[in-house]
Amino acid sequence: MRNADHGGRPAGVFGATAAGGVHPRLRAARLALWLIAAVLAARQVAVVLATPRGERLTDLETWLGPDGVLHVTGSLYDSTRFTGTPFGGLVLKPLTRAAEQALGWGWTFGTLLLVVALGLIAARALPQPVGRRTALLAAPVAVSLLMLSLPVRNTLWLGQTSIMPVLLVLLGCFVAHGQRLSGLLIGVAAALQPTLLLFTPLLWCTGRRRAAVAAGATFAAGTGIAWAAMPHDSHRYWVHHMAGAGLGGPADDLANQSLHGALLRLGLNGPPEIALFLVLGAAVAVLALRRAVRYFRDGQPLLAVAVTGCAALVVSPTAWQHQLLWVLLAVVGRAGRRASDRYVWPATVVMVMTLPAKMLLPNMTILAPLRDNVVLLAALAAATAVPFLSRTSPYYRAPLPAQYAPAVPSRFRYVPPPLLRRVLTRPNLLLELLLIRVTYAAYSQVRLAATGGSNSAGRAEAEEHGAQIHALERALRIDIEHWANHTVAGIDRLREFFDYYYTSFHFAVPLAVLAVLYWRRPADYRWARSALGITTLLALAGFWLYPLAPPRLMPTLGFIDTVHGVQDFSQPDYGTLTALTNQYAAMPSLHFGWSLWCGVVIAVLARGRWAKALGAVHPLLTAVAIVVTGNHWVLDAVGGAVAVGLGFGLTYVLQGPRAGTAAVAGHDREPVQKPVHR
């Protein structure tokens, strides 16, 4: 594949072009990215080696028998924890002495070197021609993404060999000289991971028939030699376990992201499930290979390899998490005609491969099938559905541009120019929803981590800060919380109203405002969303630096918790109302901050007076609700107001004035850029 150039430059020119005349900023950016990759690698090594010996490299430990590595009495598959092929066990046996000495540092650093090699090869295999910036930054970005990915992290943690088949395929496709050597490497990879035989028809259909024959012959020879040397293990693997099915854990386990595992999780089993799996697997393989051949002939060999690898994951009986790197390689595919859609697929792939599924989708019963199979769905989409652009498409290198608001001379001199251009078009909804969900999941995790992972861990410090806030309010003569709390608690209807307002409008109103802006005012949506995001980040910093007990969780002040009920202060975990919420994230108050954000946005953008009045009423009612229910101090609301002010201010500094204002102010001087229709 490396020697077959379809409209691009040869690999040798790639390196020469990248090396000449590097701009200082690009050189600095490349150095910074390599430093990030090094830090990520060091972090992964530290996590593995800091773990007690019995809890790390657990899959590597399955190779240990009474007499050392792979000197296992009986079959390798007696415990079902060894998931490799018999050929893999046969190849590793000569390395037993070295492996026994490399169960820690040596094995981990060796795996890291393989990951770096994988990233370098993938970066050099990008479809040609590529820009100088891409050529310089691709390698450190690829290595960093690999270090962050869940498959690599699991491989390092478990001590698996799943990097080797992927690396062998990339070496055979992009590095090896000669078709025989290329086929040999891919055949060895298939002997280690049988479903990689799908690369054999890819080689055949793309004109590399000698390589295809060599790959098939190498796989057959390796498997035959392993069968002759280890007949009992070979029979267990190929016949009893159906090419690895059931090894490493139950086939319906969530970690098995193959089509077979998904069908089992849906409740199918027995002959009907096997028949459906074979039919669907064959359809996926045929469709994916047709697409891969088309992308290869189009001059996108790395995408062709990634599509074939994703199909191999789908049709495999078992595809454990450490074997899913093929999905990450599909990030090189370009999809979408509009510039605003160009980042949807890469961002989705990166988040799927680096974040747990529970961060991507809410824990709702209706979404369980999607959440449980999110990696499988990404692989299936890459193999069969995503409309990747051809290099001959006019949108491949020049997508339809977004509309930008022109610059306006309305900024103060000491404010730097906008760092982000003010886009007027509507952003991609899928990407927005995904980012909002991931941001909220991260927000929840940071809230909990601010008290050491549980509410009881930060109880003493939070109560001390609560006493400080109470003393300050008494000095300022604004300590009205106790009077307001007991007054409202004695009036049933008033208490019920403010309890409902506190629990129901916190999320509903901001989401409604965002939804209306997205649909009716896309440019203003970007401005408002950025201000809300910055406000939330500032609030998280406040939660982390200053954990604060709200009035209802101050044991000696006699507040009534009208929302959650009576708290048992004699219990150590009395404040732990839920394991996923930090009850001491009170300063600043995001209840009030988000409501004030809603009020400001409505006041600025609404046209009718009644709408502006409703916008003003919402933060006022929220301020009353958080105080009378005993959930916040008055100064918490002040802190929330400060966070909102800083959020809008930093948005102005980073983006300039609101895009709608900028477009109106600059209308007479510079027309708004129109999209180019090809």
Image: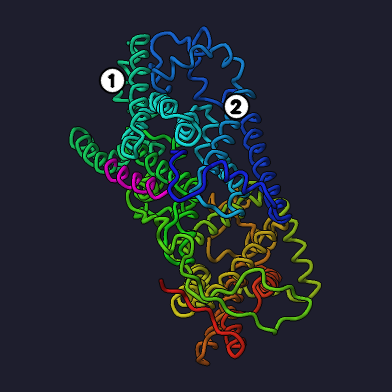
Quick one: SS at disc 1? Answer: helix
Task: Say which quadrant the N terminus sits in.
Answer: top left
In percent of width and height, residue 438 lies at 52, 56
Q: Is residue 147 left or right of residue 372?
A: right
**From what the image shows, is residue 70 above or below residue 675?**
above
Mark 1 Cα-neighbour bin, 10 Å: few <14, some 14–19, many ≥20: few
The one nearer the camera, 676 or 166, is: 676
Q: Is residue 282 left or right of residue 458?
A: left
Q: Which residue is mark 1?
A: 240
In percent of width and height, residue 629 lies at 58, 69
Residue ID at (60%, 32%): 112
Q: Residue furthest right?
A: 475
Q: Which residue is mark 2?
A: 110
Report the Cα–Cα distance between label 2 and label 1: 33 Å
The one nearer the camera, 673 or 228, is: 673
The one nearer the camera, 430 or 3, is: 3
Badge 2 amino acid: Gly
Q: Residue furthest bottom?
A: 609
**From what the image shows, is residue 162 above or below residue 93?**
below
In percent of width and height, residue 266 lies at 28, 43
Task: Say which quadrant the C terminus sits in.
Answer: bottom left
Q: Can residue 482 be seen here?
A: no
Magenta stretch, residue numbers: 285-300
Q: Is residue 298 magenta?
A: yes
Badge 1 amino acid: His
Is label 2 or label 1 in front? Answer: 2
